[in-house]
Amino acid sequence: MTAEPTTEPFSVRLEIRSYEIDPQLHLGGGFYIQYADHSRFACVQAAGISVEDLLADGMGPVNLETVIKYHRELRGGDQVDVSCDWEWGDGKTYRVRHVMTHVDGTVAAEVSHVSGLLDLRTRRLIADPAHAWRARADRPELLRLRPDRPRGTTE
């Protein structure tokens, strides 16, 4: 039986802390990327993937391109939902898109990445990152992947 990918992307809620605001009293630009990274790491963990095991196997996720689109400011004390949505193709790269939304539903920003899995020995991107993520996931649907077969089975 194969699970259908979830319809809603994974999301975490974060609160903007005072030390993250800049002189204009809104969230500093670098924190948008950190929030996206936090959401992606939480998504990978929720999918049942151990990043430590991934690294021990000689692979590490890498961002090759990052784009931030600002829509509405985030200020100290605001709460923001940060989604994590994965898009897969056939090549060595994939996309991860994060939408940062105020609690009232207003989109504050979008962060998108072109990413890959780096072979830490050869320093080259692995050919099939979807397979590598899927093979390690208990809940691959959180990564928008369909399971090949249940983990721990051989047929």
Image (cartoon, grey):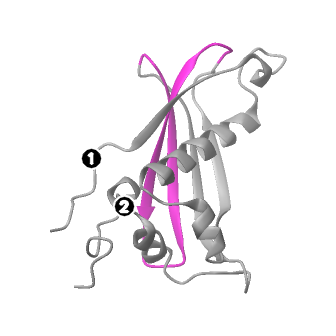
Q: Secondary structure under badge 2?
A: loop
Find residue 134 and report its horizontal and vertical position in percent: 40, 70
Pair 2/1: label in front: 2
Q: Neighbour class for label 2 at 10 Å: few (<14), some, many (≥20)?
A: some
84 or 48: nearer the viewer: 48
On residue 138, the disc is 2
The three-letter code of the residue at mark 1 reads Thr
Q: Main secondary structure of the magenta part?
A: strand
According to the picture, the residue beneath numbered tag 1 turns out to be: 7
Q: CA distance from mark 2 to mark 1?
A: 18 Å
Few, some or many residues within 10 Å of mark 1 (<14, 14–19, 20+): few
**Residue at position x 46%, y 22% from top?**
106
Quarter of the C terminus within the rendering: bottom left
Amino acid type, callout 2? Asp
Among the 4 quarters of the image, the one containing residue 123: bottom right
Q: Is residue 116 visible?
A: no
Q: How many marks?
A: 2
Please state if 89 lies on the left or on the right of 78 as rendered.
left
Q: Quadrant of residue 121?
A: bottom right
Q: Quadrant of the N terminus?
A: bottom left
Judged left or right of residue 144, residue 106 is right
Position of 142 relative to 140 (above/below): above
Start and end of the magenta stretch? 75-104
Q: Is residue 147 inside the magenta stretch?
A: no
